[in-house]
Image (tube, coloured by chain):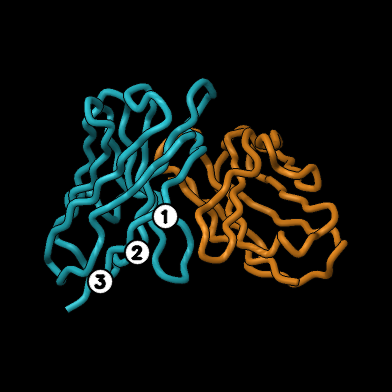
């Protein structure tokens, strides 16, 4: 069974940093592209970042470019999102999401349960 | 970047009604369109991909159509368990933009 379990969320002050992790199991993590997607309270879904199977390429939404860094450790089946210079508008549930293999495009087929990041003083 | 526009933003219908949600892309995305269902407090669930392909396990009352810039999600007979917010998403390349969502109520 595919499982994606995020951790690392919490309360952080504006300007602060936080690192999220996503532990993957139930599939061969190293062969799947991954994403981070977020959802502000009561709002819609916003794609944040994409990472290829070997750690490249990496892409970011304009709203987080230069502040967030995505990486992965295929040996440990872990996906990371390093967030810095956090702003109130970064407050959201952060989901890690898997890209389906074997189909054209970057279709998201599995989502983790999410971890809540709250940026507030 | 390509923008994804959903309409309506919310709707209320009765059990058994046919419900249609539309999604428009600002540029041609071919068939690279997915629909997700998100029930309150839950994680998004993939319903349809490639504009019209039903994900395994999804009830047949859900269907999708369209290509290029105009797409439709149809629920042929609305059920109480279909209360949710529905999102379209383009996935032909980054950014993987989502539509604003359509909240379906009974």
Q: Which mark is residue A92?
A: 2
Image location (x, y in percent) of residue B63: 76, 43
Q: Are dots 2 and 1 on a single chain?
A: yes
How much space separates mark 2 and mark 1, taking CA atoms? 10 Å
The residue closer to the viewer here, A104 or B28, is A104
Choose the circle earlier in sequence order: 3 or 1: 1
Distance between the alpha carbons at the discs numbered 2 and 3: 9 Å
Indicate the chain on which mark 3 is placed: A
Q: Chain of mark 1?
A: A
User: Could you tell me how many numbered marks the image carries?
Assistant: 3
Residue B67 visible in the current orientation: no
Q: Quadrant of residue A83?
A: bottom left
User: Residue A59: percent from the left, percent from the top?
Assistant: 30, 38
Q: Earlier in the sequence, mark 2 or mark 1?
A: 1
Q: Which mark is residue A46?
A: 1
Q: Which residue is mark 3?
A: A88
Element on which disc 2 rests = strand
User: From the viewer's perspective, is A114 left or right of A121?
Assistant: right
Residue at x 45%, y 33% (from the top left corner): A99
Horizontal relation, residue B16 to residue A44: left or right? right
- Residue appearing at x 76%, y 44% in the figure: B59
Q: Colour of chain A?
A: cyan
User: Same chain, marks 3 and 1?
Assistant: yes
**Mark 2 neighbour class, 10 Å CA radius: few under 14, some 14 to 19, many 20 or more:** many
Which chain is displayed in orange in the rendered image? B
């Amino acid at each position: 069974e595919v499982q994606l379990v995020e951790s690392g969320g919490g309360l952080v002050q504006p300007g602060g940093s936080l690192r999220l992790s996503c532990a993957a199991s139930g599939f061969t993590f190293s062969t799947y592209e991954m994403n981070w997607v977020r959802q502000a309270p009561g709002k819609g879904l916003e794609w944040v970042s994409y990472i290829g199977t070997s750690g490249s390429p990496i892409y970011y939404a304009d709203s987080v470019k230069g502040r967030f860094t995505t990486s992965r450790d295929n040996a440990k089946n872990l996906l990371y999102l390093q967030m810095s210079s956090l702003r109130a508008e970064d407050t959201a549930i952060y989901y890690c999401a898997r890209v389906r293999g074997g189909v054209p495009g970057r279709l998201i087929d599995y989502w983790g349960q999410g971890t809540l990041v709250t940026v507030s003083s | 970047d390509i923008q994804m526009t959903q309409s309506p933003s919310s709707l209320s219908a009765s059990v058994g009604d046919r419900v249609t949600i539309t999604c428009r892309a600002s540029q041609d995305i071919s068939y690279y369109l997915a629909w997700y269902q998100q029930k309150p407090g839950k994680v998004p669930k993939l319903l349809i991909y490639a504009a019209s392909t039903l994900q395994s396990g999804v009830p047949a009352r859900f269907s999708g159509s369209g290509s290029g810039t105009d797409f439709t999600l149809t629920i042929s007979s609305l059920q109480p368990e279909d209360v949710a917010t529905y999102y379209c998403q383009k996935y032909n390349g980054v950014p993987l933009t989502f539509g604003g969502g359509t909240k379906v109520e009974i």
